[in-house]
C-alpha cells in the first residue's frame, strides 16, 4: 500500500479555512481546545484529478449560471454501472445541493401534514428533523442491537408500516452511525414489506462507495423493477471524495410519477440550478479518481483496525464493532458508568476530544458516541492517548 502517495498521513491545518469541523468547536463543545472527530467530513486532501479540474475552472474568471453537460450524466451512469451493475437512464436523475435537501423535499412531496414517516434509530439526526420540521410524525422502527451488531426488526417494521397514515420509510444504507451495509436478503425484505403496505422508500445511499473490508453495497432500487418503482435513491460524491463543501447531490428515480412530484418542489424552490464547481468535481472524481478511493479505503481500514485494537487492549470496558462501511465508529461508553452529561463533559474537558453525542441519533444512542476516524493516523493516535490518559486519571 502506498498510503502517502495521496498524503493521508500528512496533517493539514484546517483552522481558518472555513471548516465547520474546526470553527464550530467553540459553539458545540464550548471550547476550541478539542481534537475535532465529529461532523462527517475527512481531514484529507481531495484526489489530485479533482483539484486540477477545479483549478482549471478557477482560471476562467467568469462564474455565471452553469449547466450540466452530457459528460456529467455519463460520469454518474458509468459509476453506477461499474460499481453496482446498475443501469440508470439520464431521465431518472434529478439534482439539488444536498442529500438532506433531497430527503426533505421527498418528505414534502410524498406526505401531508400529520402523516407518519418511519426511520430506524439510532440514525443520522436530520432524519428526525426533516420529518418534524414539516409537521409530519416520526415513527420509530428501532434497530436491534445484538452484542454490538445491529439488525432490522422486520416484524415491527411490518407492523408500523401497515398503519395507513404511514407513507414513507427513510432508509439509511449504509447506515450512519451503526455502519451496517444492508445485505441483499435484508433489502428484499424491506422491499417486500414496503410494497405490501404501500410505503415509498427514500433510500439515503450517500455512504455507498465507502464500503470496507470487502463488503458490497447493493442499491435497493437495483433489486427489482417493483422495488425501483417505489424508491427514490439519494446519492452524492460528497462523502466518498470529501466534497461536502461543493453542495452537489443527485437522486435516481425511475418511477415517472414520483419524479414528477419531486420536480414540482425542486423547480418550485429553484433548487435544481447547481453551482459551477460541484459537477466538475463529480466528473473528475467518478472518471479519474478510482485509485485514490482504493488507497483511501485502505487507509480508513488501517485507522479503524488501529482504534479497535487500541480500545480492546487498553480500554476494554468500551465496546466498538468494525463498521462495514463509513469512516464513523459507534462506540459504546456505558462501561465508563457515567451519566450522559458527565460523559460529555469528561470527553471535552478531560480527554479534550470532540465526538458526536450518541443521544442526538435518538434515545437508543444514550451512552454512545460517534467518532470520525477520517484523519491522519497521528491525529487519531493522539486523540486515543488523550482519552486513555483522562480515563486513567478519572476512572479508578
Ligand atoms: C446518512 C447521511 N445522509 C446525508 C448526509 C449529508 O448530506 P448532504 O450534506 O448532501 O445534505 C450525511 C452526512 O453526514 C449522512 O451521513
Image (cartoon, grey):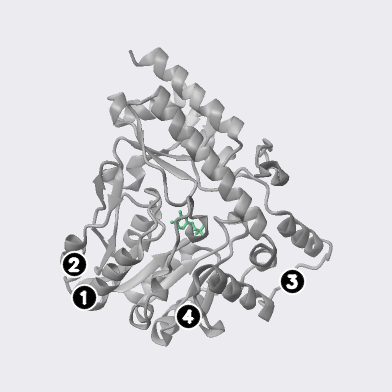
Instruction: Name the front one of labels 4 and 1.
Output: 1
Q: Which mark is residue 158?
A: 2
Q: CA distance from mark 1 to mark 3?
A: 47 Å
Snapshot quadrant of residue 392: top left
Q: Residues within 10 Å of mark 1 (few under 14, many from 20)?
A: some
Comes first in the chain, label 1 or label 2: 2
Residue placed at 50% from the left, 66% from the top? 235
Disc 4, disc 2: CB below 8 Å? no
Instruction: Name the front one of labels 4 and 2.
Output: 2
Q: CA distance from mark 3 to mark 2?
A: 49 Å
Instruction: Name the front one of labels 1 and 3.
Output: 1
Comes first in the chain, label 3 or label 4: 3
Q: Residues within 10 Å of mark 3 (few under 14, many from 20)?
A: few
Query: What SS does tag 4 mark?
Result: helix
In the image, is 281 to the left or to the right of 85?
Answer: right
Q: Which residue is mark 3?
A: 64
Residue placed at 21% from the left, 77% from the top? 196
Query: What SS does tag 1 mark?
Result: helix
Query: What SS does tag 2 mark?
Result: helix
Disc 3, disc 4: CB below 8 Å? no
Amino acid at each position: 500500500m502506498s498510503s502517502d502517495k495521496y498524503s493521508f498521513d500528512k496533517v493539514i491545518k484546517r483552522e481558518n479555512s472555513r471548516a465547520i469541523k474546526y470553527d464550530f468547536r467553540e459553539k458545540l463543545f464550548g471550547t476550541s481546545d478539542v481534537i475535532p472527530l465529529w461532523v462527517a467530513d475527512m481531514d484529507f486532501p481531495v484526489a489530485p484529478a479533482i483539484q486540477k479540474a477545479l483549478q482549471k475552472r478557477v482560471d476562467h474568471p467568469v462564474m455565471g449560471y452553469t449547466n450540466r453537460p452530457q459528460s456529467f450524466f455519463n460520469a454518474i451512469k458509468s459509476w453506477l454501472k461499474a460499481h453496482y451493475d446498475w443501469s440508470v437512464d439520464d431521465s431518472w436523475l434529478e439534482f439539488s445541493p444536498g442529500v438532506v435537501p433531497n430527503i426533505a423535499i421527498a418528505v414534502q412531496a410524498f406526505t401531508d401534514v400529520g402523516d407518519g414517516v418511519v426511520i430506524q434509530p439510532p440514525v443520522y439526526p436530520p432524519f428526525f428533523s426533516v420529518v418534524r420540521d414539516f409537521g409530519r410524525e416520526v415513527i420509530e422502527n428501532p434497530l436491534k442491537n445484538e452484542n454490538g451488531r445491529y439488525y432490522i426488526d422486520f416484524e415491527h417494521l411490518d407492523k408500523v408500516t401497515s398503519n395507513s397514515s404511514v407513507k414513507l420509510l427513510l432508509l439509511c444504507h449504509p447506515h450512519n452511525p451503526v455502519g451496517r451495509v444492508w445485505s441483499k436478503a435484508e433489502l428484499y425484505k424491506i422491499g417486500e414489506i414496503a410494497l405490501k403496505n404501500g410505503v415509498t422508500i427514500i433510500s439515503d445511499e450517500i455512504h455507498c462507495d465507502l464500503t470496507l473490508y470487502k463488503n458490497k453495497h447493493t442499491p435497493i432500487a437495483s433489486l427489482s423493477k417493483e422495488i425501483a418503482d417505489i424508491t427514490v435513491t439519494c446519492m452524492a460524491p460528497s462523502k466518498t471524495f470529501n466534497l461536502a463543501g461543493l453542495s452537489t447531490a443527485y437522486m435516481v428515480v425511475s418511477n415517472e410519477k414520483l419524479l414528477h412530484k419531486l420536480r414540482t418542489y425542486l423547480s418550485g424552490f429553484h433548487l435544481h440550478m447547481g453551482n459551477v464547481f460541484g459537477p466538475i468535481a463529480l466528473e473528475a472524481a467518478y472518471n479519474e479518481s478510482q485509485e485514490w478511493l482504493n488507497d483511501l479505503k485502505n487507509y480508513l481500514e488501517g485507522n479503524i483496525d488501529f482504534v479497535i485494537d487500541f480500545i480492546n487492549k487498553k480500554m476494554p470496558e468500551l465496546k466498538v464493532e468494525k463498521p462495514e462501511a463509513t469512516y464513523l465508529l459507534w462506540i459504546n461508553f456505558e462501561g465508563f458508568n457515567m451519566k450522559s452529561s458527565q460523559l460529555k463533559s469528561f470527553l471535552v474537558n478531560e480527554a479534550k476530544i470532540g465526538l458526536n453525542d450518541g443521544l442526538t441519533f435518538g434515545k437508543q444512542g444514550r451512552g454512545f458516541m460517534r467518532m470520525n476516524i477520517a484523519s491522519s493516523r497521528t491525529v487519531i493516535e493522539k486523540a486515543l492517548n488523550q482519552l486513555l490518559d483522562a480515563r486513567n486519571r478519572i476512572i479508578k
